[in-house]
Image (spheres, helix red, strand yellow):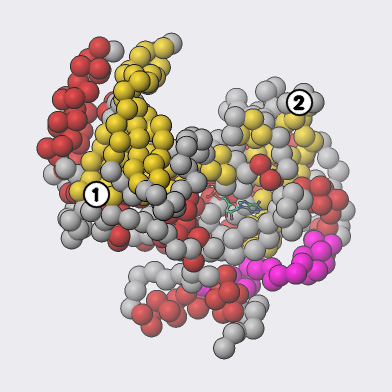
Amino acid sequence: MDQSDRHIVAIVGAGPAGLFAARELASQGVQVVLFNRDIKPGGLAEYGIYPDKIKMKTGLRAQFRQILELPDVEYFGNVLIGQQGDLTLDDLRRLGFQAILVAAGAQGTKWLGLPGEHLRGVYHAKDVVYHYNKLPPFSQQHLEIGKRVAIIGVGNVMMDIARYLISVRKVDEVVAFARRGPAEIKFDRKELEAVVANLDLAAFDREIERVAKEMRAIGQHPEVAREFIHSAAARGVWMQSHTLFWIRFLSSPSRILDDGSGRVGGLEIEDTHLVLEGGEVKARGLGQFHVFDVDTVIFAIGDRVDENLGLPVHNFAFDKNPNPRFPIEGESYEAYDSEKDEPIEGVFVEGWSRKASSGLVGVARKDGVNGARAVLQYLAGLPPAAPDVLPKVQETLSRLPHPVVTRDALKLLEAAEQAKMQELGVEDFKFASNQEMLEVMGLLKAVS
Ligand SMILES: Cc1cc2nc3c(=O)[nH]c(=O)nc-3n(C[C@H](O)[C@H](O)[C@H](O)COP(=O)(O)OP(=O)(O)OC[C@H]3O[C@@H](n4cnc5c(N)ncnc54)[C@H](O)[C@@H]3O)c2cc1C
């Protein structure tokens, strides 16, 4: 297609949503420019998915590589978009992008606002997940993980973190706390199988016994929850670790105690009971408190979008047009200013930026494609882009005070990683600092 006939779109974020959106847009002749905070593409597929799921990661990397080889897709890594970033959304507009698709995931963290959250030994899931997946700068931070670790939340992320604590850190004890009951757990059987060998089954049965009356009172079946765990136990994999793992239900964290030195000295929880409200199971505090002897607390209660991106945020999410002009499958992908009650012209959101912490890669991929389809509808009403947008972008990026990573540079990084894999005889290898990655791409002088 003639360069002068084309539309041009900026995608913020090269995780699964952004990359699959890029492919969809490029397949319709749109020039796409991906801006990615991280040096490497992949987002949580690279830096969230548990490190030993190598087959899954390798498969996804191969797909991402193919997308980045498309002639209509440009990639600029190590570039942060946002109010305190290298470029703002307004800068992207001024450069001539006709639409901006925000696929930056959900980079903010949710906290409960409890006393003691500032103590040493308190972490958000992201600190831990990014650390063990080697995302700089998290990979370079020292995590003060003790011997007895509380994880708040009972989803798949909790399970991944429990797995890390059991198999790598080999702590003495991991206890997951759930505000509601066994019927409201959010983890999948597969994730459970990875840790179930360390689950204290006798303690789990006693816990089911303890909460059975509450469950039955709202029509739930404790034996179903018990069976779910026991059937997974048969497939458990022994991780050569003495860690004892257990789950406490009907427990709402209320305070983190100081051990006297500014470090976690315990977790206070309030017992809850279950109520049915409008068909939904809710937990209500009972005013009875207990302290658990833990020295580390990790919050795995979900994420929120990044407020620095420059889009209006309410309830941890970017505002979306309640009456979308370009709906896809009845969903809105359009950024919105709910204070002014008007759409933000030409800006779209998708993936975890549209719905934080929602679903696996397949869901992000579908949402990415759908976001791109909404953008295509919007572009249909616009004339082609100015022909000089890409050169202007390159010129602007060349003036940044740090190196920008292109598709060609990524190939050098991949080759260096492959060489390291061979040298070390391992199945996967990642450099844990930006410095090392930039060095092997020849973008930074090696420090001797
Ligand atoms: C701990 C964990 C384990 C998981 N395990 C699995 C699993 O086993 N299997 C599975 O299918 N799914 C798993 N998932 C879910 C899966 O990773 C997500 O569904 C998917 O990655 C979300 O895609 P996304 O593109 O919306 O966001 P992300 O993957 O978060 O990608 C966002 C991208 O945006 C970039 N970015 C962020 N902010 C900016 C900015 N300001 N400027 C420029 N770029 C920016 C980031 O660098 C990143 O590349 C897991 C998730 C987590 C958290």
The Cα–Cα distance between marks 1 and 2, rounded to whole angstroms, is 47 Å
Furthest-front residue in view?
260
Name the residue located 14 percent from the left edge and 31 percent from the top edge.
Answer: 206
- Residue 8 horizontal/vertical position (percent): 77, 51
Q: Is residue 394 visible?
A: no
Q: Could you classify mark 1 by the number of other residues whose Cα lies within 10 Å: few (under 14), some (14-19), or many (20 or more)?
A: many
Q: Where is residue 142 in the image (x, y as percent from the top left)?
A: 44, 63
- Along the polypeptide, which appears first: circle 1 or circle 2? 1
Q: Position of residue 379 (x, y in %)?
A: 77, 40
Residue highlighted by disc 2: 339
Q: In this view, does 36 lie above or below 266?
A: below
| Stretch of the chain drawn in magenta | 392-414
Residue 173's label in the rendered image is 1
| Placement of the C terminus among the 4 image quadrants | bottom right
Q: Looking at the image, which residue is at 44% across and 80% down?
A: 419
Q: Quadrant of residue 304?
A: top right
* Amino acid under disc 1: Glu
